[in-house]
Amino acid sequence: MAYYGMRKVIEAQRKAKGEKSKQITDEMVKLEDEIKKLKGELTVLRASGGPSPEIELRLTKLGPLEYRLRQLLIGLEA
């Protein structure tokens, strides 16, 4: 389980106890999983000397996902 998946469980436990908690959304968990998958693919492609267009394709997918996750985290802190 990834970081935000565990954090979601912890925050749910805090809420159940009546403590202050933050709302970790399913979207955050999903984004983290997608980012992790793309980074793994990039590592494999770079290590094997994969074609540059394949690397660029994954990088163009990765940027918006990381941006969206950062925006959700900023909203979480507010």
Image (spheres, rainbow, N blue to C red):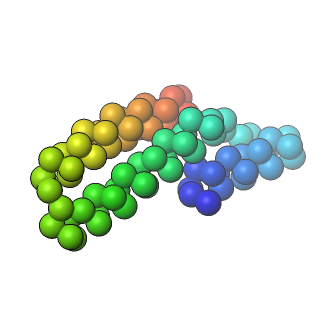
Q: Considering the image in quadrants, where does the N terminus appear?
A: bottom right
69 lies left or right of 59: right
4 lies left or right of 14: left
Whether residue 52 is visible to the viewer of this picture, yes or no, is: yes
74 lies left or right of 3: left
Whether residue 77 is visible to the viewer of this picture, yes or no, is: no
Give residue 20's position: percent from left, percent from top. 74, 40
Give residue 13's position: percent from left, percent from top. 80, 49
In the rendered image, the residue lying farthest to the right is 17
30 lies left or right of 44: right
The vertical placement of 61 against 54, above or below, is above
> Image point 65% across, 55% down: which residue?
6
Foreground: 25 or 48? 48
Give residue 14's position: percent from left, percent from top. 78, 47
Foreground: 61 or 5? 61
Foreground: 78 or 68? 68
In the rendered image, the residue lying farthest to the left is 52
> Image point 62% across, 36% down: which residue?
25
In which image quadrant can residue 48 be found? bottom left
Give residue 38's position: percent from left, percent from top. 36, 52
> Image point 32% across, 43% down: which residue?
62
